[in-house]
Image (cartoon, rainbow, N blue to C red):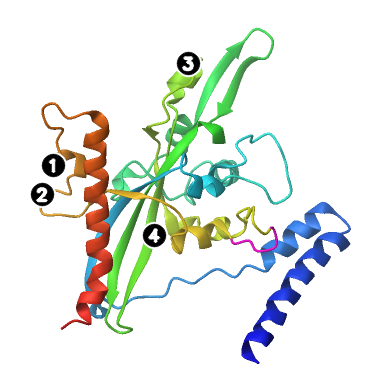
Amino acid sequence: MRSIAAFFILFSNLIFSQVDLINAKKPIDAEKKSINEITPLEYGTIDENDILWSRVVYEFIDLNEKLNFPLLFPTNDEQNKIGRKSIWRVLKEFIVNKIEEDPSGKNLEIYKFDEFSSEDKLSTNEIKDLMSYELISRKAGTQTLYVNSNEIGGYNIKGIWYFDKKYSELKYRLLGIQPVGANTEDLKNGVQNPNLGSPYFWIWYPSVREELNNHLVFNDRNTNNRISFDDLLINRRFSSFIYKYNNLYGDREIKDYIKQRPGESKQQHNLRIILESERIKKEILDFELDMWGY
């Protein structure tokens, strides 16, 4: 009986979602209705005494991987499709709007480095320099253009895994996100197919959660079953690899100690780096299982 009831609840939600779209008097009405159905997961306050173990981990989300396409597409920021934006466009518009509202940048938690120290907080001019460039043409003159979604190659993220002894559970909390894309100087100079490996700035993730929760991720399998960008990220519905974690050796990156061997190809070297990343990931996830073994 419970399974039948659950089916009808799910089925009715899907129908209502379709009805909202069909009955919308304006296109924006359907978009607002969809967004209002998503409730963000609250970040609860954790007592220091409840943390038995923790590890800070840095990962890279490669937008070339198919599993990460919901973060990448649509790549044309000039198109306005209902409920369709890439995560970069969401972040870009959020930042630009905040700067226009308050040029002092008080409401923006954007930093140069991942330590998020007050000394490293970027000014609004520094932020704009990292995400925009000037393009000079005879017809249009000088234009200030912002980096487009198709010029973003991925995201570095910083998070912390911790074991909550109060609930006897291994948990994860996302702390920061850094867009990685084309160098703005290359874009300014018209370089064709620029390398998309230039890191921009670190955004303190809790400061953008509310905005990311207002935008839904497109689901090509079922357009009625959609989640917010915030839900996707904090529940780790993406593919990534660890490139660094807090360690005794000054938080060195994996590539700093997995060196390329004589005669080893670049592909073989990269494979060993990925294998080390997977080893660290397994070590973290096995911690919870090991706790029950004692």
- Residue 138 appearing in the image: yes
Name the spot of residue 69 as percent of width and height, x first: 53, 45
How far is mark 4 from mark 3, CA to CA?
34 Å
Above or below, comparing residue 123 to residue 290 in the picture: above
- Pinpoint residue 202: horizontal percent, then vertical percent: 38, 45
Marks 1 and 2 close (CB-CB < 8 Å): yes
Q: Is residue 200 magenta?
A: no
| Highlighted magenta segment, given as a residue range | 223-227
Q: Are marks 4 and 3 in contact (CB under 8 Å)?
A: no
Q: Is residue 125 above or below residue 2?
A: above
Mark number displayed over residue 191: 3
Q: CA distance from mark 1 to mark 2?
A: 10 Å
The residue lying toward the viewer, choosing from 208 and 169, is 169
Return the disc, 2 or 4, that comes first in the chain's sequence.
4
Between disc 1 and disc 3, whose residue precedes?
Answer: 3
Callout 3 amino acid = Val
Q: Is residue 44 left or right of residue 149?
A: left
Secondary element type, mark 4: strand
In reply to whether residue 224 is colored magenta, the answer given is yes
What residue type is disc 1 on? Answer: Tyr
Mark 4 closeness class: few <14, some 14–19, many ≥20 residues within 10 Å: some
- Which residue is found at the position 51% from the left and 15% from the top? 190
Location of the C terminus by quadrant is bottom left
Report, in whole angstroms, how far the alpha carbon at label 1 lies from the one at label 3. Answer: 33 Å
Residue under label 4: 174
Give the residue type that dot 2 points to.
Answer: Tyr
Q: Main secondary structure of the magenta part?
A: loop
Can you tell which quarter of the image residue 221 is in? bottom right
Q: Position of residue 148 (x, y in %)?
A: 56, 32
- First-in-chain label (4 vs 3): 4
Q: Which residue is mark 2?
A: 249
The image shows residue 250 at horizontal and vertical percentages of 13, 48
